[in-house]
Amino acid sequence: MENNTRSKKEILDKINSGYLLLDGAMGTMLQKNGLKLGVPPESFNITHPEIIKKITTDYAKAGALVLTTNTFGANSHKLLKSGYSVKEIITSATQITREVANEYGAFVAQDIGPIGEMLKPVGSLSFEDAYEIIKEQVENTTADIIIIETMTDLNEMRAAVLAAKENTNLPIFCMMTFEQSEDKKAMRTFLGVSPSEMGIVLESLAVDAIGVNCSNAPTEVIEIIKTLKKVTNLPIIAKPNAGLPNINSNDYDLSPEDFAKDMGKLLDVGATIVGGSCCTTPL
């Protein structure tokens, strides 16, 4: 299979010339396709590659120009007891995604999520160890883009960005996930990071796009997008959930039609790179 890696210039030209459509959820799609509780979603790259390819192909058919590898938790900490190495998981995931991307003319993005252990002083993981964990992930990629998402700790995000910048020459997209404060007057990450803090720090690190993903419905991230537009000139990413989970239906509360309608509001306030998180689907 040909690699057909896309150039950084081609990708940056694309994101700076208009709108770019990302794909949607992988984890909730895998749950619908038989993923059992306690099984690493990334193991499906090896045990059920046909499922990963089908989901990825459906997103490509729906128009996604960035196809994300099934590697959200593909780090040595989360894979410790899985029986698979980081290299095995990332290699298999990228091969599957690249095959689809080659067919549909899309970009391949390596997905990097939180390590799964808090950094000091909140937790016990050092900044240097976090860097090395993420370095192992990016060193094993043949993707076109690095996507770092669902972060709540700005120090962990910094470790991830530095590992990506110092060990690859790929464009870097960064997203953090925010929740409403108790007084409902502000949005912050679980560890207290504000959208403006994220924007200022990540622009200083010279990443290529920043934004928000997960945890909120489209209309609930409008103010985050507006804030980011005030503090940075970088392209803004919006990748929200399909609303909130419904405990009765075991689904999320926004229909595809409502989600699409609300995403238009994010474009109106400045988002130019858009996609979906939990419970969004290709259809």
Image (tube, rainbow, N blue to C red):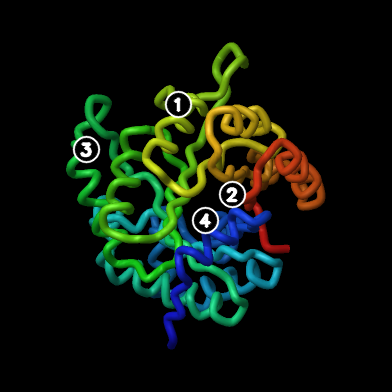
- The disc label shown at residue 127, or none: 3
Q: 255 and 107: which one is in front?
A: 107
Q: 5 and 27: which one is in front?
A: 5
Lower position in the chain sequence, tag 1 or tag 3: 3
Separation of residues labelled 2 and 3 (CA atoms)? 27 Å
- Amino acid beneath label 4: Gly
Image position of 120 (left or right of 37): left
Lower position in the chain sequence, tag 1 or tag 4: 4
Q: Residue at x 76, y 39 (%)?
A: 268
The residue where tag 1 is placed is: 197
Image position of 130 (left or right of 278): left
Instruction: Pinpoint residue 216: horizontal percent, then vertical percent.
Output: 62, 36
Separation of residues labelled 4 and 2 (CA atoms)? 9 Å
Residues packed near mark 2 inside 10 Å, few (<14), some (14 to 19) or many (20 plus):
many
Q: Is residue 41 visible?
A: no
Q: Residue at x 55, y 18 (%)?
A: 181
Residues packed near mark 1 inside 10 Å, few (<14), some (14 to 19) or many (20 plus):
some
- The disc label shown at residue 277, or none: 2
> In the rendered image, which quarter contains the C terminus?
bottom right
Instruction: Pinpoint residue 241: horizontal percent, then vertical percent.
Output: 63, 44
Of the residues tagged 1 and 4, which is closer to the observer?
A: 1
| Location of residue 60 by image quarter | bottom right
